[in-house]
């Protein structure tokens, strides 16, 4: 591959990853203004984000079918273009356009979420760990930037929420432009149009017997019969659930403990910043091992320690609890996506496993903040809800250990993790 083509591939991949969260995370800082302008009640305003998160779970299933017909690269391009359309529609006048645009943007993110592990497997089969690290870190950075820049952009430009939120279409279109050469070129790397290597070759091009041809043609059939699939799915869902619990309720917990609102917001930002450190380093180290069990245990223990710190002493060194929590949550997310990539033998199977794990996982995750809110209402405090969160972290660790063990892949082949 020429240096120019490599540069386009790397730049397009990173910019696509940066687009996975700003349209979602950038909505919260503008929500009060949106509700006032459109005339929405608080539940109706919250429903905008709910629509997007539900779409993450409901429409990830589209990705394997699109990839089978058009290829992974074109599927990712379609997701970027749909994302740009969605954020523009969301900024149009009226509540129907607001919800329709949110649904379109959520569907686009769902497609890209599921496609990215397969894209890593297809373009970087010998560097799965490092490139998983790159894309998950870009995802986290994109989320933080989306949340942090909306209000300053309003003040800087003088625009309202419609114009500022519509600016999220710009990086999506830029990523689509950079990714266009990948989508247009014909496969020349030994993969077929679905991103699967020819029969008899494994993910690194070595001759092997591999799974049966029927697995290649119908990856879902094999995946849904595999216990590995459901352990991976459970780990993906539970680490998302324990993350979204804190994302939704952490500022309120700190405020109820007596901290001012601005400090509570800074602490939430700190935990997001700490996640970047974990997402950038953990996949590189864990990807070199056949088993990721020690990494899963360590990340779960860090997450549990963060929960316990917030529960026991929310106003005592809260910055320390946020760093610990962020390291645990960032590592858990990175490991979940790395395990998806390593537990299937080729890009087509990775995409199918990603669809199963992320679709069920995000539906499960959407329930977390709601259940914690109900426990808070019934118990009258945060002890019971946070203990429930700790229990979820323990189950997360158990399922993660089962998913991270070296064994047969979800589609019947051997794990592709390599010891280096």
Image (cartoon, rainbow, N blue to C red):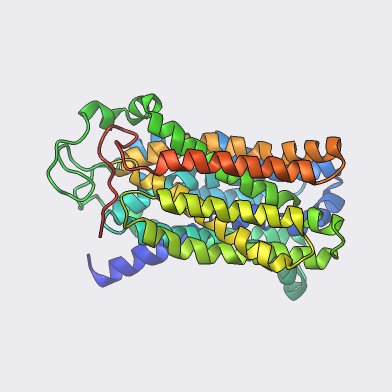
Measured as percent of width and height from the top left, residue 11 is found at: 40, 66
Mark count: 0
Quadrant of res 281: bottom left
Residue at the bottom extreme, as displayed: 156
Q: Can residue 224 be seen at all in this image of the molecule?
A: yes
Quadrant of res 7: bottom left
84 vs 1: above or below? above
Query: Is 356 positioned to the left or the right of 382 in the image?
Result: left
Q: Nearer the viewer, residue 34 or 200?
A: 200
Measured as percent of width and height from the top left, residue 218 is found at: 31, 27
Measured as percent of width and height from the top left, residue 119 is found at: 36, 51
Q: Nearer the viewer, residue 39 or 381?
A: 381
Residue at the front extreme, as displayed: 312
Q: Residue at x 84, y 64 (%)?
A: 259
* Picture quarter with the N terminus: bottom left
221 vs 228: above or below? above
Query: Is 281 positioned to the left or the right of 257 in the image?
Result: left
* Picture quarter with the C terminus: bottom left
Q: Residue at x 33, y 38 (%)?
A: 349
Q: Nearer the viewer, residue 233 or 66?
A: 233
Query: Is 97 positioned to the left or the right of 126 in the image?
Result: right
Q: Residue at x 39, y 36 (%)?
A: 352
Residue at the left extreme, as displayed: 207
Q: Residue at x 41, y 57 (%)?
A: 132
Quadrant of res 102: top right
Q: Can residue 74 be seen at all in this image of the molecule?
A: no
Q: Nearer the viewer, residue 160 or 362?
A: 362
Measured as percent of width and height from the top left, residue 216 is found at: 26, 32
């Amino acid at each position: 591959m020429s240096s120019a083509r490599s540069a386009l591939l790397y730049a397009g991949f990173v910019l696509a990853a940066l687009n996975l969260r700003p349209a979602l995370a950038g909505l919260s800082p503008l929500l009060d203004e949106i509700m006032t302008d459109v005339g929405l009640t608080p539940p109706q305003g919250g429903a905008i984000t709910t629509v997007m998160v539900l779409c993450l779970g409901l429409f990830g299933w589209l990705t394997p079918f699109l990839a089978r017909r058009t290829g992974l690269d074109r599927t990712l391009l379609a997701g970027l273009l749909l994302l740009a359309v969605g954020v523009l529609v969301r900024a149009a006048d009226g509540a129907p356009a607001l919800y329709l645009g949110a649904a379109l943007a959520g569907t686009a993110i769902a497609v890209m979420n599921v496609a990215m592990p397969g894209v890593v497997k297809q373009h970087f089969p010998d560097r799965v760990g490092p490139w998983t690290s790159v894309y998950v870190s870009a995802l986290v950075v994109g989320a933080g930037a989306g949340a942090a820049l909306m209000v300053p952009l309003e003040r800087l430009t003088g625009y309202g929420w419609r114009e500022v939120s519509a600016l999220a279409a710009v990086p999506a279109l830029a990523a689509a432009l950079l990714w266009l050469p990948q989508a247009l070129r014909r496969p020349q790397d030994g993969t077929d149009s679905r991103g699967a290597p020819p029969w008899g070759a494994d993910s690194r091009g070595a001759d092997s017997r591999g799974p049966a041809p029927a697995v290649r043609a119908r990856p879902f059939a094999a995946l849904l019969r595999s216990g590995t699939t459901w352990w991976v799915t459970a780990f993906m869902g539970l680490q998302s659930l324990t993350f979204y619990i804190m994302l939704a309720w952490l500022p309120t917990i700190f405020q109820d403990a007596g901290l001012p609102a601005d400090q509570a917001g800074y602490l939430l930002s700190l935990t997001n910043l700490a996640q970047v450190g974990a997402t950038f380093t953990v996949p590189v180290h864990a990807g070199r091992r056949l088993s990721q069990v020690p990494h899963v245990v360590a990340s779960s223990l860090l997450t549990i320690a963060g929960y316990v710190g917030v529960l026991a002493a929310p106003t005592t060194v809260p910055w320390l609890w946020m760093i610990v929590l962020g390291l645990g949550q960032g590592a858990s997310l990175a490991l979940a996506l790395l395990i998806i990539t390593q537990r299937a033998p080729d890009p087509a199977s990775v995409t199918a496993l990603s669809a199963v794990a992320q679709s069920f996982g995000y539906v499960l995750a959407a329930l977390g903040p709601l259940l914690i809110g109900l426990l808070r209402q019934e118990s009258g405090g945060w002890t019971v809800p946070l203990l429930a969160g700790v229990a979820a972290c323990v189950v997360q660790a158990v399922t993660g250990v089962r998913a991270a063990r070296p064994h047969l892949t979800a589609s019947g082949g051997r794990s592709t993790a390599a010891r280096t």
